[in-house]
Amino acid sequence: MSAQTFFIGFFGLAAVWFGVVVFRTHSMVRSALALLFSQTALGALFLSMQAEFLGVLQIMMMATEMSIMAIFMVMFMMDPGGLGEMDMTHQKRLSLAAGFVAFAAAVAAAVFVDWGPVAGVAPDAAQQTHDLGIELLGRSMLIFETAGVTILTAMIAATAVAMPAVKRIGNK
Amino acid sequence: MTTVLVLLLLLAAGTYLVAVLEAWTASGRFRLAGPVVAGIALLGREFIVPRKPDRIFFEVAPVLLLLSALLAAAVVPLTPDLIITDLATGALFINAALVYVLVALLMAGWGPNGAYAMIGGWRFLGQLIAYAMLIVMPITAVVMRAESLLTTRIVASQAGLWNIVYQPLGFMLFFVAAMALAFLPPFDLPTAKAELAGGVEAEYSGVRLAIFRLGRLALIVTLAAAAVVFYLGGWQGPWLPPWAWSAIKILAVCATMLLAGRAMPRVRDADLLHWCWILGIPLALLNIFLVGLLVLVLP
């Protein structure tokens, strides 16, 4: 077994384990940061698959996003510290079924999709960054921009909803 | 392996000098033995653990702070050869490593189960939302000129003209944002001695506090080194050898950062957010636009 295979397996298992931890803890901050480390393990998984730019990007983006999620979880949950031992799971049967179906669908996609010929050697990291840039600003521009504008709209909408009504009406 | 050891030793030496400098800017006394005395004093004290802490966060936070500064330092070149790893995503990797400063401070804030620490930790999250774009966007402009994310290429791209002259606006934004990232005064909101009794540091003592403070000093050195690589031509300079130029520039940036904040009152978190988003981000976009024009127009 090569070192690459070992690390891919290791970080894959780490990602799954931290994903499990998200639901095993009672503390909202622990839960959010466990999700962060699950995503960081995915970033490390990318790195061990020689996708350097994607790996570093994943490790960078998730740290900010999950930290921000942590404060939202603390604000909105009734027992953020977890001292009351609130159960993190609900609708167990439905969740189990949904989880199983999603897992089966992912496995089916992995097995049955024709992925084309497997690349023998990954291009070097600088070339990958270059190719990714060309892809994002070329063929994938529309998807990229649609996603960007959708997120921006959601951000503006969320900010508008969060602003107190008094200020919006104003009394000047 | 030797490169790693040499760079770690240099980082330790830099950290020590910055500790001396910081004590000097704060108290006016220049004592070379000061950090040693302070370190021994910290190790000699009782290691207090607060009641009902989140033990994992409490123990991990100081180590994570130090680790993120060290990881970021791994892609910063002191000479063309003196670099731990010249990653093809170097400029991005510095960011990725330094974001974990936020995670460390959140852990240090939440872990000890204390009000002051918690306020300090969440404050730093707000601070990140203010400064983060002002770190990333000026670096984007630097990368645009170098046409590479490799830190050594970024230094090489400044051979004719340093970026501090080529894109002064970017340098100013990056400098301020770096001070906010290292929570130096006047951006020391998460620690704020006067109002939060130390904030995220408040519940730490003994060896954990020593590691926390070491991590913070290493962070200042790493950020100064990053500023030198991105804007001050890295190791370039006449007469002296490259490593000497790197060392002089890094210490000069550290001293400027430490001195700049001393005369200013602490910025309120809401004001910091306001100014960073109303003024900082438009200026950073303008900087990207101007650099884009220069890259196209100049040969």
Image (tube, rainbow, N blue to C red):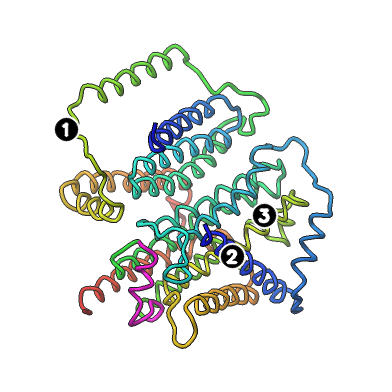
Residue placed furthest toward the bottom: B239
Q: What residue is rendered at 38% in x and 81% in y?
A: B165
The crowd level at tag 2 (other Cα within 10 Å; few <14, some 14-19, many 20+) is some
Q: In the image, which disc is placed on residue B11?
A: 2
On the picture, is A122 further left or further right than B54? left
The crowd level at tag 3 (other Cα within 10 Å; few <14, some 14-19, many 20+) is many
Kindly identify which residue carries mark 3.
Answer: B212
In the image shown, does B193 or B265 lie closer to the viewer? B193
Instruction: Give the answer, above or below, for where B85 lies relative to A43.
Output: below
Amino acid type at image mark 3: Phe
Element assignment for label 3: helix
Q: What residue is rendered at 48% in x and 60% in y?
A: B131
Residue interval drawn in magenta: B150-165
| Percent of width and height locating residue B229 | 44, 70
| Mark nearer the viewer, 3 or 2 | 2
Dot 3: chain letter:
B
Callouts 1 and 2 close, C-beta under 8 Å: no
The N terminus of chain A sits in image quarter: top left
Amino acid type at image mark 2: Leu
Labels 1 and 2 share a subunit: no
Real-space Cα distance between discs 3 and 2?
Answer: 16 Å
Dot 2: chain letter:
B
Real-space Cα distance between discs 3 and 1?
Answer: 50 Å
From this viewpoint, is residue A49 visible?
Answer: yes
Real-space Cα distance between discs 1 and 2?
Answer: 48 Å
Q: In the image, which disc is placed on residue A116?
A: 1
Element assignment for label 2: helix
Dot 1: chain letter:
A
Which of the 4 image quarters holds residue B163? bottom left
From this viewpoint, is residue B122 visible?
Answer: no
